Amino acid sequence: MTTKQEQTLSAWFKQFDRAHQLSVSRQLAAVGLVRCLSLVFLILGFYFFALGIHTWIVHQLPFSSDTILKMALCFLVSWLIQGGSHLLVQRYKQGLLIRLEHQLARSLAWQQHALIRQQSPFYWQSLWLKHIPSLVNWCFEYRVQQLVATVMPLLVLAVIFSVNYVIGIGLIFALPVVPLFMIIVGKGAASQHKKHFTALNRLGSLFADRLNALPLLASYQAHNKQSQLLTNASTQLNERTMKVVSVAFLSNTVLDFFATLSVALVAVFIGFTLLGELKIGPEISLHHGLWILLTVPLLLSEMKRLGQVYHQKAEVEAARAPLDKVFGELPPSNHDKQERFTHFFTNKFSVDGLLTGTNVSVTRGDKIRVCGKSGTGKTVLLEALAGQRLASAQLAGTFVWIHQSPLIMPGSLRSNLTVGRVLDDNALRDALHQVELTAWFEVLPKGLDTIMSNYPALSGGEAQRLSLARALLSNADIWFLDEPTAHLPENQHHRLSALIATITRDKTVFWASHKYLPANYFSQHWIISNKHIICCPSEGNCDE
């Protein structure tokens, strides 16, 4: 029987599957059916093996060729079906992983700026490299095993009842102990996994932050104090890890104990019945007794296997909140097919109590410079206009972001540039050339297929230029630029600013920057002061 917690998780994934059109339910049913079919043929093989042993020992006749043929055929078919099920699972897992990564890439491309600054880079790496694979494994390992461990015991019990109802009744009382213990341990494991992820995220974020601040630590001679902080976080993570491992060992040990005890009780009952010491229920032949003895461990092994992958459920419980947050805010599937932006006007504009404005007007092709001191809300305004924050109105159309701290995804350079689209390699190289990344690109070991991990290392300016290259390859008609050249030298800032101005000649642009930009780039200047947006014509003053 499924617990309430499991119902909640299954219902969540069913809704998740429907919302993102993953079509996982049919795949799960297909894999579960194939796995069950493999076990059915294996049980039939045990039947013919037990028949041969019975004939050999009781009737003192050799295995008949017919029995050997049927037994071999059943084992062969079972083995082939099992191999096919493994291939099917790998194929479905790879497909689901690709689809989820594509959805995440769309979400990060759509909200890259508003989203990533809410969490540390280590958090997003964990989401991509840990949580998504955990969800995939849970779908095609735990849930398939759950289906098999539910269907096969019922089927085997039906067969055992037809042979000897006493053994069937005994197993009915013994078998529920296994899933009951898995549920009890699973609740504790889910809690431990959440604490473990929190500790892991804390240590990773702390380490990344201190690594970036090494020059500052050296200036203030704070190495010893920060080393102690890292040591404490590492110790806490080790403690969380050992608790998770302890729960896993406890689960396996108890499952093995109950499984061994159940098989031993069945073996004792059958043995004493065959010896004539027990006369409870129908008479058992050596054929049926040996068949049951071979089948019961198989039944229990499927339940034990469910216990061995039960930690995957705990991992998904821990990953559920982060996945919901990101995948629950995906752009519409027709995001790239929206109508082109034409105009925007509102008498009163407000951003969730953070900003207000009156008579805010934007026409297609406008170039708007957003001005204001640091912390006044320039980034909040851009996020609101893009629909990434709760606001009274937002722009309709497709848009692209370039931010001073752009997201570089842990995939290939190609995937970072295309973001799920199919683009020609020459177009990718041309975009890199335009943003002056040719020298950097030429030393990459695998070119466009180089994985963007710790190597090749990217400076802040290179990351911004890579984000600009990604924007050049998009067909968006609205550009949100939030300090797009913050980490670039002055000369390069002017060159790339001129490139942006040329490329976006027929686009609508919102540009926030503390660096000098020619006034003739812009048709409007929006000044943010005291949480209010002041819209000025092109000749307006943007002096901060």
Image (cartoon, rainbow, N blue to C red):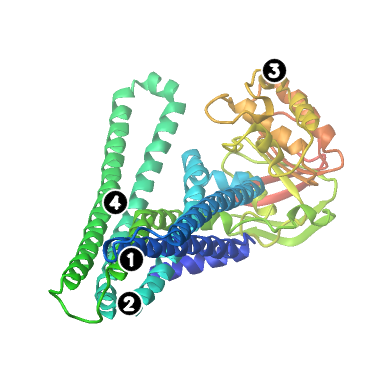
Q: Report the Cα–Cα distance between label 3 and label 4.
A: 50 Å
- Could you tell me if the residues under marks 3 and 2 are in contact, i.e. CB atoms within 8 Å? no
Q: Report the Cα–Cα distance between label 3 and label 2.
A: 77 Å
- Which quadrant would residue 430 be assigned to in this image? top right
- Which quadrant would residue 28 be assigned to in this image? bottom right
- Could you tell me if the residues under marks 3 and 1 are in contact, i.e. CB atoms within 8 Å? no
Q: Tag 1: residue type?
A: Trp
- Name the spot of residue 314 as percent of width and height, x first: 38, 56
- Name the spot of residue 444 as percent of width and height, x first: 64, 21
Q: Tag 3: residue type?
A: Ala
Q: Of the residues under marks 2 and 4, which one precedes in the sequence?
A: 2
Read off the residue under disc 1.
Answer: 291
Mark 3 or 4, closer to the camera: 4
In the picture, which quadrant includes the N terminus? bottom left
Please give left or right for residue 412 compared with residue 42 in the image.
Answer: right
User: Which mark, residue 248?
Assistant: 4
Element at badge 1? helix
Read off the residue under disc 2.
Answer: 163
Mark 4 packing: few (<14 Cα in 10 Å), some, or many (20+)? some
